[in-house]
Amino acid sequence: RGKRAFIAGVADDNGYGWAIAKSLAAAGAEILVGTWVPALNIFENSLRRGKFDESRVLPDGSLMEITKIYPLDAVYDCPEDVPEDVKTNKRYAGSANWTVKEAAESVKQDFGTIDILVHSLANGPEVSKPLLETSRNGYLAAVSASSYSFVSLLKHFLPIMNPGGATISLTYIASEKIIPGYGGGMSSAKAALESDTQVLAFEAGRKHNVRVNTISAGPLRSRAAKAIGFIDMMIDYSLENAPLQKELTADEVGNAAAFLSSPLASAITGAVVYVDNGLNAMGVGV
Ligand code: NAD
């Protein structure tokens, strides 16, 4: 039987989530995605109208099929958590069952089990502010959307994950080294995500024989990264200073994710795997 993957955080064809979906599809996996509720309509319409067809092409020439798209807002665990203004917001009112718990229940109803869970989402409303100028709410929102969202996804999807399964999240080196400009508590959120990767590897490994790893990815011109505002500078910096002087493609991260979620990586868990042309290994710029 082929593997089934649920990838949370796909809303266009520019980000890491899309590339991971493609690499998993190329390896034979069935693809389910979770799309942020406010982005759902545009994503579904663009997909239907063929806007992504060029980037759906897999190495064998076929097109990636997404079996089902689930609405998701990973900052809410269950319906009781959703505030009234969000419930009645017209971008949300048109969709149903998009809290983490309900999304997991829907996937269970539709497909029974999954093998691979991917968390490719982050949000920091104050990301452009230095940490010293970040509000408590902004900081907590960054951690809620970017770190606890993974704890919550794993908690709710673990019961429907087949033993031997694997989970992947995406992190950034700003968790451990100073990257001015990656503010709003996003550096703190990535540090939490990486620490949680270890603790959750232990808990999910013992409980369900599921592996938990995170990819520390180099800079990519995704929608989220463009919103931060310094992505071109980070790409140039990497080109100048990394051991491998080439622009990082999303596919390279996708392929690493496919490896990490495959039996080839059956002894790898609790790891931060750098997919960044080696930039993390440099001590100084050159
Ligand atoms: P992206 O814009 O493609 O992905 C982010 C996704 O998160 C979007 O689809 C957005 O709709 C979704 N999202 C935001 N809030 C959400 C919520 N509450 N519930 C559900 N979905 C939500 O951008 P990306 O850069 O590919 O980001 C994917 C992951 O890669 C993130 O964790 C990011 O921090 C990480 N990353 C990115 C870079 C980079 O340079 N782009 C580098 C290292 C790590």
Image (cartoon, helix red, strand yellow):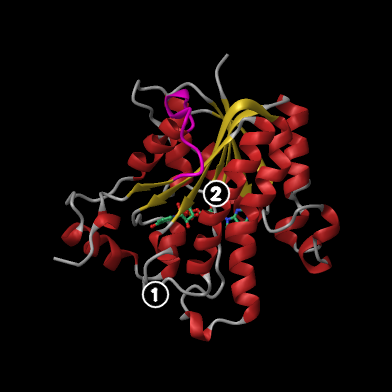
Q: Residues within 10 Å of mark 1 (few under 14, many from 20)?
A: some
Indicate the position of residue 217 as horizontal and vertical percent values: 38, 51
Q: Residue at x 42, y 40 (%)?
A: 19
The verdict on residue 101 being magenta is no
Q: Which residues are magenta?
A: 261-271
Q: Residue at x 59, y 58 (%)?
A: 147
* Of residues 86 and 144, the one drawn nearer to the viewer in this rendering: 144
Separation (CA) of disc 1 from disc 2:
24 Å
* Of residues 51 and 144, the one drawn nearer to the viewer in this rendering: 144
* Of residues 131 and 129, the one drawn nearer to the viewer in this rendering: 131
Name the mark nearer the viewer: 1 or 2: 2
Q: Which residue is mark 1?
A: 181
Check the picture and name the quadrant holding the N terminus: top right
Is the residue at mark 1 in contact range of ligand 1, meaning its CB lies under 8 Å from it?
Answer: no
| Element on which disc 2 rests | helix
Whether label 1 touches label 2, CB < 8 Å: no
User: Is 136 positioned to the left or the right of 213 in the image?
Assistant: right
Q: Main secondary structure of the magenta part?
A: loop
Image height of 236 relative to 12, above or below = below
Q: Which residue is mark 2?
A: 197
Q: Residue at x 54, y 58 (%)?
A: 122
